[in-house]
Protein backbone atom coordinates (compact mmCIF):
# COMPACT_ATOMS: atom_id res chain seq x y z
CA UNK A 1 0.00 0.00 0.00
CA UNK A 2 1.36 3.42 -0.94
CA UNK A 3 1.97 6.05 1.73
CA UNK A 4 2.15 8.89 -0.78
CA UNK A 5 0.03 11.67 0.79
CA UNK A 6 -1.14 12.78 -2.67
CA UNK A 7 -2.44 9.28 -3.35
CA UNK A 8 -4.21 9.25 0.02
CA UNK A 9 -5.80 12.66 -0.64
CA UNK A 10 -7.07 11.64 -4.06
CA UNK A 11 -8.33 8.35 -2.61
CA UNK A 12 -10.32 10.22 0.03
CA UNK A 13 -11.67 12.66 -2.57
CA UNK A 14 -12.75 9.85 -4.89
CA UNK A 15 -14.43 7.97 -2.03
CA UNK A 16 -16.38 11.06 -0.99
CA UNK A 17 -17.37 11.74 -4.59
CA UNK A 18 -18.68 8.27 -5.34
CA UNK A 19 -20.60 8.14 -2.05
CA UNK A 20 -22.25 11.47 -2.81
CA UNK A 21 -23.13 10.63 -6.41
CA UNK A 22 -24.36 7.12 -5.61
CA UNK A 23 -26.65 8.57 -2.95
CA UNK A 24 -28.54 10.34 -5.73
CA UNK A 25 -28.78 7.65 -8.40
CA UNK A 26 -27.62 4.07 -9.11
CA UNK A 27 -23.85 3.76 -9.37
CA UNK A 28 -24.25 1.90 -12.66
CA UNK A 29 -25.46 5.16 -14.23
CA UNK A 30 -22.50 7.23 -12.97
CA UNK A 31 -19.50 7.81 -15.20
CA UNK A 32 -15.80 7.95 -14.43
CA UNK A 33 -15.74 11.53 -15.72
CA UNK A 34 -18.45 12.61 -13.26
CA UNK A 35 -16.63 11.09 -10.31
CA UNK A 36 -13.27 12.54 -11.33
CA UNK A 37 -14.78 15.99 -11.81
CA UNK A 38 -16.55 15.86 -8.43
CA UNK A 39 -13.33 14.69 -6.75
CA UNK A 40 -11.20 17.32 -8.49
CA UNK A 41 -8.88 14.75 -10.08
CA UNK A 42 -8.14 13.53 -13.59
CA UNK A 43 -9.53 10.39 -15.20
CA UNK A 44 -6.01 8.97 -15.14
CA UNK A 45 -5.91 9.46 -11.38
CA UNK A 46 -9.26 7.71 -11.07
CA UNK A 47 -7.86 4.67 -12.86
CA UNK A 48 -4.91 4.62 -10.48
CA UNK A 49 -7.47 3.84 -7.76
CA UNK A 50 -10.24 1.82 -9.40
CA UNK A 51 -11.30 0.17 -12.63
CA UNK A 52 -14.89 1.44 -12.64
CA UNK A 53 -17.37 3.46 -10.57
CA UNK A 54 -18.78 0.17 -9.26
CA UNK A 55 -15.38 -1.08 -8.09
CA UNK A 56 -14.63 2.26 -6.44
CA UNK A 57 -17.92 2.21 -4.55
CA UNK A 58 -17.44 -1.42 -3.53
CA UNK A 59 -13.95 -0.74 -2.20
CA UNK A 60 -15.10 2.40 -0.35
CA UNK A 61 -17.86 0.52 1.46
CA UNK A 62 -15.73 -2.56 2.07
CA UNK A 63 -13.29 -0.49 4.14
CA UNK A 64 -16.09 0.10 6.67
CA UNK A 65 -17.50 -3.41 6.35
CA UNK A 66 -14.10 -5.04 6.88
CA UNK A 67 -13.69 -3.07 10.12
CA UNK A 68 -17.04 -4.43 11.33
CA UNK A 69 -15.96 -7.99 10.51
CA UNK A 70 -12.62 -7.53 12.26
CA UNK A 71 -14.30 -6.28 15.44
CA UNK A 72 -16.76 -9.19 15.31
CA UNK A 73 -14.00 -11.80 14.96
CA UNK A 74 -11.83 -10.24 17.67
CA UNK A 75 -14.76 -10.26 20.09
CA UNK A 76 -15.66 -13.83 19.14
CA UNK A 77 -12.08 -14.99 19.60
CA UNK A 78 -12.07 -13.50 23.10
CA UNK A 79 -15.50 -14.83 24.17
CA UNK A 80 -16.78 -17.56 21.82
CA UNK A 81 -19.56 -18.58 24.20
CA UNK A 82 -21.02 -15.06 24.04
CA UNK A 83 -21.67 -15.48 20.31
CA UNK A 84 -25.30 -14.33 20.36
CA UNK A 85 -24.42 -11.09 22.16
CA UNK A 86 -21.44 -10.52 19.87
CA UNK A 87 -23.52 -11.31 16.76
CA UNK A 88 -26.22 -8.86 17.89
CA UNK A 89 -23.63 -6.10 18.34
CA UNK A 90 -22.10 -6.81 14.93
CA UNK A 91 -25.54 -6.85 13.31
CA UNK A 92 -26.25 -3.45 14.85
CA UNK A 93 -22.90 -2.14 13.59
CA UNK A 94 -23.78 -3.35 10.08
CA UNK A 95 -27.22 -1.76 10.17
CA UNK A 96 -25.85 1.52 11.53
CA UNK A 97 -23.35 1.50 8.64
CA UNK A 98 -26.27 1.09 6.25
CA UNK A 99 -28.21 3.84 7.99
CA UNK A 100 -25.23 6.23 7.63
CA UNK A 101 -25.44 5.62 3.88
CA UNK A 102 -29.20 5.12 3.80
CA UNK A 103 -29.98 6.83 0.50
CA UNK A 104 -27.10 5.08 -1.22
CA UNK A 105 -28.29 1.66 -0.06
CA UNK A 106 -31.98 2.45 -0.58
CA UNK A 107 -31.27 3.28 -4.22
CA UNK A 108 -28.69 0.57 -4.76
CA UNK A 109 -30.70 -2.24 -3.18
CA UNK A 110 -34.02 -1.30 -4.80
CA UNK A 111 -35.42 -4.02 -7.06
CA UNK A 112 -33.55 -3.85 -10.37
CA UNK A 113 -35.55 -2.19 -13.14
CA UNK A 114 -32.91 -2.26 -15.87
CA UNK A 115 -31.33 1.00 -14.72
CA UNK A 116 -29.01 -0.73 -12.29
CA UNK A 117 -27.76 -4.13 -11.28
CA UNK A 118 -26.78 -5.68 -8.00
CA UNK A 119 -23.45 -4.12 -7.01
CA UNK A 120 -24.52 -3.21 -3.48
CA UNK A 121 -26.38 -6.48 -2.96
CA UNK A 122 -23.20 -8.32 -3.97
CA UNK A 123 -21.06 -6.17 -1.65
CA UNK A 124 -23.30 -6.76 1.38
CA UNK A 125 -23.95 -10.42 0.69
CA UNK A 126 -20.26 -11.00 0.05
CA UNK A 127 -19.36 -9.32 3.34
CA UNK A 128 -21.83 -11.42 5.33
CA UNK A 129 -20.94 -14.67 3.56
CA UNK A 130 -17.19 -14.15 4.03
CA UNK A 131 -17.77 -13.35 7.71
CA UNK A 132 -19.72 -16.59 8.16
CA UNK A 133 -17.07 -18.66 6.38
CA UNK A 134 -14.42 -17.16 8.67
CA UNK A 135 -16.59 -17.87 11.72
CA UNK A 136 -17.15 -21.45 10.58
CA UNK A 137 -13.43 -21.99 10.02
CA UNK A 138 -12.58 -20.52 13.42
CA UNK A 139 -15.14 -22.85 15.00
CA UNK A 140 -13.71 -25.95 13.34
CA UNK A 141 -16.61 -26.55 10.96
CA UNK A 142 -15.96 -29.08 8.18
CA UNK A 143 -14.74 -27.57 4.92
CA UNK A 144 -15.06 -30.56 2.61
CA UNK A 145 -17.62 -33.13 1.57
CA UNK A 146 -21.34 -32.84 2.12
CA UNK A 147 -20.87 -31.21 5.53
CA UNK A 148 -18.70 -28.48 3.99
CA UNK A 149 -21.24 -27.94 1.23
CA UNK A 150 -23.98 -27.69 3.85
CA UNK A 151 -22.13 -24.89 5.63
CA UNK A 152 -21.45 -23.10 2.32
CA UNK A 153 -25.15 -23.30 1.47
CA UNK A 154 -26.10 -22.06 4.94
CA UNK A 155 -23.73 -19.08 4.64
CA UNK A 156 -25.16 -18.17 1.24
CA UNK A 157 -28.71 -18.55 2.59
CA UNK A 158 -28.09 -16.23 5.55
CA UNK A 159 -26.21 -13.63 3.51
CA UNK A 160 -28.78 -13.36 0.74
CA UNK A 161 -31.67 -13.44 3.20
CA UNK A 162 -30.14 -10.68 5.31
CA UNK A 163 -29.70 -8.48 2.25
CA UNK A 164 -33.34 -9.06 1.33
CA UNK A 165 -34.45 -8.18 4.86
CA UNK A 166 -32.38 -4.99 4.81
CA UNK A 167 -33.84 -4.05 1.44
CA UNK A 168 -37.35 -4.38 2.89
CA UNK A 169 -36.35 -2.33 5.95
CA UNK A 170 -34.92 0.47 3.80
CA UNK A 171 -38.00 0.58 1.57
CA UNK A 172 -40.46 0.72 4.49
CA UNK A 173 -41.90 4.08 5.54
CA UNK A 174 -39.70 5.91 8.05
CA UNK A 175 -38.49 6.64 10.57
CA UNK A 176 -36.18 3.63 10.59
CA UNK A 177 -34.99 2.14 13.87
CA UNK A 178 -31.74 0.11 13.60
CA UNK A 179 -32.57 -1.76 16.80
CA UNK A 180 -35.92 -2.81 15.32
CA UNK A 181 -34.04 -4.20 12.30
CA UNK A 182 -31.67 -6.17 14.54
CA UNK A 183 -34.53 -7.52 16.63
CA UNK A 184 -36.34 -8.58 13.45
CA UNK A 185 -33.39 -10.20 11.69
CA UNK A 186 -31.67 -12.01 14.55
CA UNK A 187 -34.47 -14.55 15.22
CA UNK A 188 -34.31 -15.52 11.53
CA UNK A 189 -30.68 -16.67 11.77
CA UNK A 190 -30.56 -20.49 11.90
CA UNK A 191 -29.58 -21.75 15.35
CA UNK A 192 -26.83 -23.90 13.82
CA UNK A 193 -24.58 -20.83 13.65
CA UNK A 194 -24.85 -20.05 17.34
CA UNK A 195 -24.54 -23.69 18.32
CA UNK A 196 -21.46 -24.12 16.14
CA UNK A 197 -19.74 -21.06 17.56
CA UNK A 198 -20.52 -21.97 21.15
CA UNK A 199 -19.43 -25.63 20.83
Image (cartoon, grey):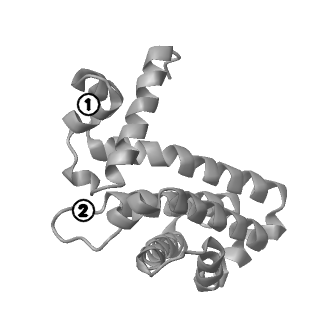
For the residue labelled by badge 2, is the local secondary structure a helix, a strand or a loop? Answer: loop
Q: Is residue 82 visible?
A: yes
Q: Residue furthest front?
A: 175
For the residue labelled by badge 1, is the local secondary structure a helix, a strand or a loop? Answer: helix
Marks 2 and 1, Cα distance to the nearest angstrom? Answer: 24 Å
Question: How many numbered callouts?
Answer: 2
Pick whichever of labels 2 and 1 is earlier in the sequence.
Answer: 1
Q: Residue at x 55, y 52 (%)?
A: 65
| Camera-side residue of 106 and 75 | 106
Q: Say if 108 sits above or below 51 in the image.
A: below
140 vs 167, left or right, is: right
- Which picture quadrant has residue 156? bottom left
Q: Say if 65 sits above or below 8 in the image.
A: below
Which residue matches tag 2? 117
159 vs 131, left or right, is: left
Which residue matches tag 1? 37
Position of residue 141 measured from the top left corner of the image (x, y, whole percent): 64, 67
59 vs 195, left or right, is: left
- Which picture quadrant has residue 199? bottom right
- Structural crowding at the residue carrying mark 1, measured as other residues with C-alpha within 10 Å and reported as few (<14), some (14–19) or many (≥20): some
- Which picture quadrant has residue 113? bottom left
Q: Residue at x 60, y 62 (%)?
A: 96
Position of residue 181 measured from the top left corner of the image (x, y, whole percent): 59, 77
Amino acid sequence: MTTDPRFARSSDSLAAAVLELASARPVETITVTEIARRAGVTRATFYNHATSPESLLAHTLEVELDAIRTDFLVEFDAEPHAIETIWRAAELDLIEHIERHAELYRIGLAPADGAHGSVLADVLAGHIEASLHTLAEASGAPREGEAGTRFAMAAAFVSQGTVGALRAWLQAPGPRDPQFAVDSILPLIPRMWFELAAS
